């Protein structure tokens, strides 16, 4: 990143932090958490302890981090090296990212930036300018991405409250600050689960590793198979609803299952994975030592804030999480994708000098598609 | 300690305090050495181990879970206690493990029956208590099923590799997993056998006496049958081949894939210098970073923690598993191509 870009981002981030102390708090039991931060063009600083909002705000103002993190885990000694921290438990966390959802819209709002010559182009096998095969994909999230990610949050919420019996007041949904959502479960019986146990929970939520026997389909004595009822709880009922649909169609649907055989049913289940399973990133859920982006902080991949979503349906990240000010800034933008922030359209820009509000300038610079003029 | 009735001690002899039991019955270990009537029990004890070593479950003399004659009950308990003495004197851990597993499976049958006993509530309560006190597993009876909190279920189920034990293949409702009595007891088999093993290990080894010499010698011969031979091939498992292919093509291998590859090769005894060039084609290759990370995994920098190759389960959940029949139910990629044969 150019020095002048870094300066602009640091100034903008500092101003945001200074004016938004009310949005940025240490989480519950701060003295048992590990904090960490990164600076622009810098490495990770972690194993930090912050005991109060005051200490956190001081860190933000003095270090002006690009990203701030806090552990989901609780430790006896959060500042010691990993193996000596003495793990006491960890909040259950979930990451839903629209880039993992294989959406068709993605190619429409993704471009490539060559790592050798910095030119921007439509994704293809090599850079049209210098033929290098090494490039970064740059994506500007769209409404479809966000609404698909919201659908996943809804599916997750249903499983958490019904199957896992987690109280609604213990579930917090945050916009990640870039392309998805972070879900936290606090005060649950799952705090003590180890990484392997969390991986099992993740597989449950994702509907991974299912076998036909769970739904009464037998490998041997196939004709003796029995099928779940529509009103059953958990996955059995959900699968029945998907495969049978309405009650009146049951005989026909079951005939189809019987004629398809065991292997066919396994395929059917595998296909259902993306429809009824929630597409979370399992690596996040099974990590019991992760330092996860701190709520209220800015995400340096976009300049958006990680904000609490009180009403997920109505939540619009392009207005609700875009919290930088609108001071006009002159930049040189090479952004082939049009985007909308705070109800205003921007772009596309073809390597041109433009004057835009700071929130849009920061967004493009964070994405690597513009720099200060 | 759970208070047990006479019949219960015969069913679950590992719950009894061995020394105390002998004393209560008015016996000493030395008597087994000399008393011809008690020698029969030593033979029975040897037989109990022999059956276990063969992977079978010892058939007890209990009829309808009750001691038929007055003498049956102490015989049942004594043969278990003497078997433990013989195992301690012999000191071969593979035998102890086989014995513990067989005894666990034997107890499992009674536990299952007791758990599902509708006519005798005290039996069900005892089974629930054994499960709770020994394995901190809370079981609630609901109609014909046994409900276990998800978090408790997971602690035990992760020891199983069969897919039917995955949470996703279970009846889950409102924070609970619903199991049959058979499944509930099966869930703790491994821990039950571990409990018996640890109990045997914790017992003080008695002095060798003449009467025990012969059966102990026979046990040593028996144990030789179970030494294993390992044949290994140099072929890499498909997950590792995939990781190498992705890197060779210059495509991006996720962090978890790089971790798998590096820890696998380190586990195979390769050095950091041998492994580093594999990552040269990665789109974000940086020699310094690669070497730093590899050295970290090898435990040569940082806090000297050596990272081990992730389990097949973990690899599967990271979408990096491409199992083939040759994987043959291994549980860690490092086991690929290693075939164990019994030295019979």
Image (cartoon, coloured by chain):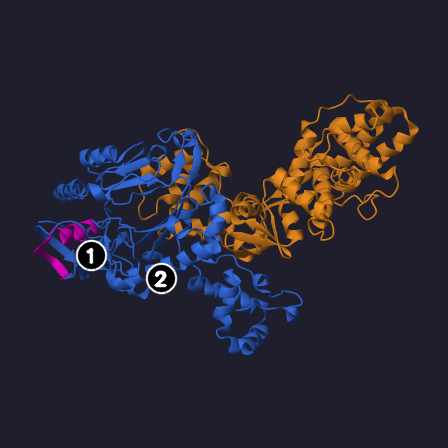
Spatial separation of the CA atoms under disc 2 and disc 1: 19 Å
Q: Nearer the viewer, residue A120 or B158?
A: B158
Q: Is residue A165 visible?
A: yes
Q: Secondary structure at mark 1?
A: helix
Magenta-colored stretch includes residue A357: yes
Q: Earlier in the sequence, mark 2 or mark 1?
A: 2
Contact? badges 2 and 1 (CB < 8 Å) = no
- A129 vs A218, nearest the viewer: A218
Which chain does the orange colour mark?
B
Residue A276 percent location from the top left of the image? 44, 63
Tag 2 residue: A151
Residue at the limit of the structure toward the top, as seen here? B207
Image-quadrant location for residue B71: top right
Q: Residue at x 63, y 68 (%)?
A: A225
Which residue is at a point 88% across and 41% down the rendered structure image?
B69
Q: Which residues fall within the magenta stretch? A: A345-369
Quarter of the N terminus of chain A within the rendering? top left
Q: Colour of chain A?
A: blue
Q: Where does residue B341 sit, x and y in percent of width and height?
A: 68, 44
Which secondary structure lies at badge 2? Answer: helix
Residue A316 placement, left or right of B98: left
Expressed as whole percent of the image width and height from the top left, the position of residue B305 reads 44, 31
Chain of the residue under label 2: A
Q: Quadrant of residue B39?
A: top right
The residue carrying mark 1 is A319
| CA neighbours of label 1 inside 10 A, class few (<14), some (14 to 19), many (20+) | some
């Amino acid at each position: 990143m150019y020095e002048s870009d870094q300066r602009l981002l640091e100034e903008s981030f500092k101003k945001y932090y200074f004016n938004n102390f009310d949005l940025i708090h240490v989480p519950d039991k701060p003295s048992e958490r590990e904090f960490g931060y990164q600076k622009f063009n810098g490495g990770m600083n972690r194993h930090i302890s912050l005991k109060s909002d005051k200490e956190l705000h001081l860190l933000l103002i003095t270090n002006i981090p690009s990203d701030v993190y806090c552990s989901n885990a609780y430790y006896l000694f959060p500042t010691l090296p990993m193996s000596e921290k003495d793990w006491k438990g960890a909040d259950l966390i979930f990451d839903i990212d629209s880039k993992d959802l294989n959406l068709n819209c993605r190619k429409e709002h993704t471009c490539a930036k060559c790592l050798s010559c910095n030119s921007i182009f439509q994704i293809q096998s090599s850079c049209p300018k210098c033929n290098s095969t090494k490039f970064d994909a740059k994506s500007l999230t769209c409404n479809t991405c966000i609404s698909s990610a919201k659908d996943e949050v809804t599916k997750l919420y249903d499983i958490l409250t019904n199957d896992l019996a987690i109280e609604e007041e213990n579930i917090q949904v945050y916009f990640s600050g870039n392309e998805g959502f972070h879900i936290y479960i606090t005060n649950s019986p799952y705090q003590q689960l180890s990484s392997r146990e969390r991986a099992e929970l993740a597989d449950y939520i994702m509907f991974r590793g299912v076998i036909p026997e769970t739904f009464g389909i037998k490998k041997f004595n196939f004709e003796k198979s029995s099928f779940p009822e529509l009103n059953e709880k958990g996955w059995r009922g959900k699968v029945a609803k998907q495969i049978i649909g309405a009650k009146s169609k049951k005989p026909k649907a079951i005939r189809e299952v019987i004629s398809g055989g065991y292997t066919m049913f396994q395929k059917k289940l595998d296909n259902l994975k993306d429809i009824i399973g929630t597409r979370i990133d399992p690596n996040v859920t099974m990590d019991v030592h992760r330092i996860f982006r701190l709520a209220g902080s800015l995400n340096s991949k976009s300049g958006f804030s990680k904000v609490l979503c009180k009403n997920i349906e109505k939540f619009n990240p392009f207005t609700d999480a875009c919290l930088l000010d609108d001071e006009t800034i002159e930049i040189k933008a090479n952004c082939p994708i049009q985007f909308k922030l705070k109800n205003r359209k921007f772009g596309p820009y073809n390597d041109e000098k433009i004057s835009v509000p700071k929130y849009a300038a920061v967004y493009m610079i964070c994405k690597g598609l513009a720099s200060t003029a | 300690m759970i208070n047990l009735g006479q019949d219960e001690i015969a069913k679950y002899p590992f719950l009894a305090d061995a020394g105390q039991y002998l004393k209560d019955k008015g016996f000493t270990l030395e008597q087994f050495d000399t008393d011809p009537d008690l020698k029969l029990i030593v033979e029975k004890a040897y037989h109990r181990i022999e059956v276990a070593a063969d992977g079978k479950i010892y058939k007890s003399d209990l009829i309808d879970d009750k001691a038929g004659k007055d003498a049956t009950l102490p015989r049942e308990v004594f043969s278990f206690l003497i078997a433990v003495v013989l195992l301690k004197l012999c000191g071969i851990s593979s035998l102890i493990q086989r014995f513990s597993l067989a005894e666990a499976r034997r107890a499992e049958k009674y536990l299952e029956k007791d758990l599902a006993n509708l006519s005798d509530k005290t039996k069900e309560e005892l089974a629930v208590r054994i499960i709770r006190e020994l394995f901190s597993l809370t079981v609630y009876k609901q109609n014909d099923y046994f409900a276990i909190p998800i978090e408790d279920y997971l602690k035990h189920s992760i020891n199983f590799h069969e897919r039917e034990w995955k949470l996703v293949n279970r009846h889950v409702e409102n924070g609970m997993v619903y199991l049959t009595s058979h499944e509930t007891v099966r869930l703790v088999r491994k821990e039950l056998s571990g409990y018996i093993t640890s109990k045997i290990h914790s017992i003080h080894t008695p002095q060798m006496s003449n009467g025990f010499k012969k059966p102990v010698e026979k046990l040593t011969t028996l144990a030789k049958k179970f030494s294993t031979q390992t044949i290994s091939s140099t072929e890499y498992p498909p997950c590792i081949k995939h990781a190498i292919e992705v890197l060779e093509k210059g495509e991006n291998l996720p962090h978890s894939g790089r971790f798998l590859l590096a820890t696998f090769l380190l586990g195979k005894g390769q050095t950091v210098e041998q492994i580093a060039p594999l990552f040269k084609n990665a789109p974000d290759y940086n020699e310094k970073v690669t070497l730093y990370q590899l050295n970290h995994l090898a435990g040569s920098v940082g806090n000297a923690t050596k990272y081990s190759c992730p389990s097949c389960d973990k690899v599967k959940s990271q979408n990096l598993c491409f199992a083939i029949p040759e994987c043959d139910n291994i549980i860690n990629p490092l086991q690929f191509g290693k075939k164990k044969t019994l030295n019979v």
